[in-house]
Amino acid sequence: MNTLETIQVPAQITEKWQEIIDLLAEVLHVPSALIMKVEPPEIRVFVRSESKGNPYERDERASLNTGLYCETVMKTRQLLLVPDALADQKWNANPDIKLGMISYMGVPVAWPNGDIFGTICVLDARRNEYSELYRKLLIQCREMLQADLKSLQASAELELKVLERTAQLRRSETELAHATRVSTLGELTASIAHEVSQPLGAMREALRAIIMDANRGNDVIRRVRALAKKTDLHKMPLDINDVIEEVMLIFRQEALSHGVSLRQELASALPQVLGDRVQLQQVIMNLLMNGIQATSAATGRRHELRIRTQKHGPDRILVAVEDSGTGIEPQNMDRLFSAFFTTKPNGLGIGLSICRSIVEQHGGDIWATRNSAEGSTFQFTLPARGETPS
């Protein structure tokens, strides 16, 4: 039996994966999100979203070699996107159609050594093209799962070494017992205890790392879920640096995936602002995403994005996002924050318009400038707490 097949996923990791799957279903607005585990000759529903309309049950099994979507993902080790199986001759006999699932998007999940654990996927009862952003979100979730598998495999390998070393030392103890005195046997026993304690200590460290990774993952999921929900404006005293730090936790991996480095220059001892945390995070996320896209598209220059805060006059704070992208064309400067204006081929032109609306609801101002060297800077100000919005 493959050693990896015997590794049990702890309850704490399973709970984290449940959060990931529920978040996927919620953000992508689909009835079903799944983590599938291969157990030849079958594949099993390991974790299912608790979303309404999900026809799959926990621990439900299906035979391989029946043309399942997930079977193809595991064989090709590539993302599979089926917008409409009913309209695709290759997929119109797929078994999942009987459950009403006609669109599919999934990626393989693998152990560190390359062995396939299974898949993470989403399914819909209607035609669904799944946007590029949704594909990236699915892949990011897959990376979180694989990070957990890496920790589990490391822990299992350490445990196996402990067992092997213990067995080896006990064999040595038996062989020497008849040829040594009691005092020598006592020394050997002390040596065994020392030899075993070292890998045991390493294994405990690995388990602590697993728990820390799980907690960090849960924290990220909680913050992404908060940003995905639509809520009424709810103002409270906020430290703008804390708001930015939470967004950076979510966005750092996104920047790295585009080859962009993120820098923070957050001023200390800034006054608080009175604002809605989720809406201000939305503004910062939109500006960061625009900056990442503009910077990654530029060639022949550094790919860097900087976010900074500072006092702005006697009663305001300023947040600036500075990129090293291609810059803003002068003729577009006056229309940047207008609804439905965009320079992106697939853009909707509502991101910056939403930013302006949120900032103005908080009594602030937002604007953009072209940098003297390269790229652009988007800035907004907010009244310090206690000041009356103008």
Image: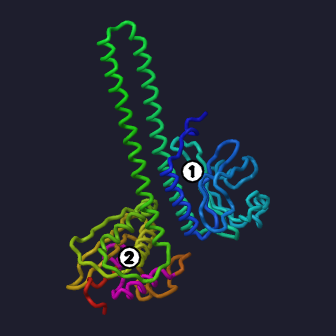
What kind of residue is marked 1? Val
Helix, strand or loop at label 2? It is helix
Residue 106 visible within the image: yes
Q: Nearest the camera: 258 or 31?
A: 31
Count of labels in the image = 2
Q: Residues within 10 Å of mark 1 (few under 14, many from 20)?
A: many
Q: Tell me the quarter of the image containing the C terminus.
A: bottom left
Q: Nearest the camera: 80 or 163?
A: 163
Helix, strand or loop at label 1? It is strand
| Residue lying at the far bottom of the rendered structure | 390
Instruction: Please report the residue visible at 46 percent of the width from the left and 83 percent of the height from the top.
Output: 232
Q: Tell me the quarter of the image containing the N terminus.
A: top right
Instruction: Please report the residue visible at 38 percent of the width from the left and 80 percent of the height from the top.
Output: 276
Q: Which residues are magenta?
A: 349-378
Label 1 or label 2, whichever comes before in sequence order: 1
Lateral position of residue 53 relative to residue 297, left or right: right
For label 2, the residue is 277
Quadrant in the picture for residue 378:
bottom left
| Vertical position of residue 221 compared to residue 190: above or below | below
The mark lying in front, picked from 1 and 2, is 2
What kind of residue is marked 2? Arg
| Vertical position of residue 135 compared to residue 185: above or below | below
| Vertical position of residue 259 compared to residue 241: above or below | above
Which percent across, then down, holds residue 173? 40, 16
Residue 259 visible within the image: no
Specify whether residue 373 is painted magenta: yes
Which percent across, then down, holds residue 355? 42, 82
Which percent across, then down, holds residue 319? 31, 77
Instruction: Please report the residue visible at 25 percent of the width from the left and 83 percent of the height from the top.
Output: 316
Q: Are marks 1 and 2 in contact (CB under 8 Å)?
A: no
For label 1, the residue is 109
Q: Nearest the camera: 96 or 138?
A: 96
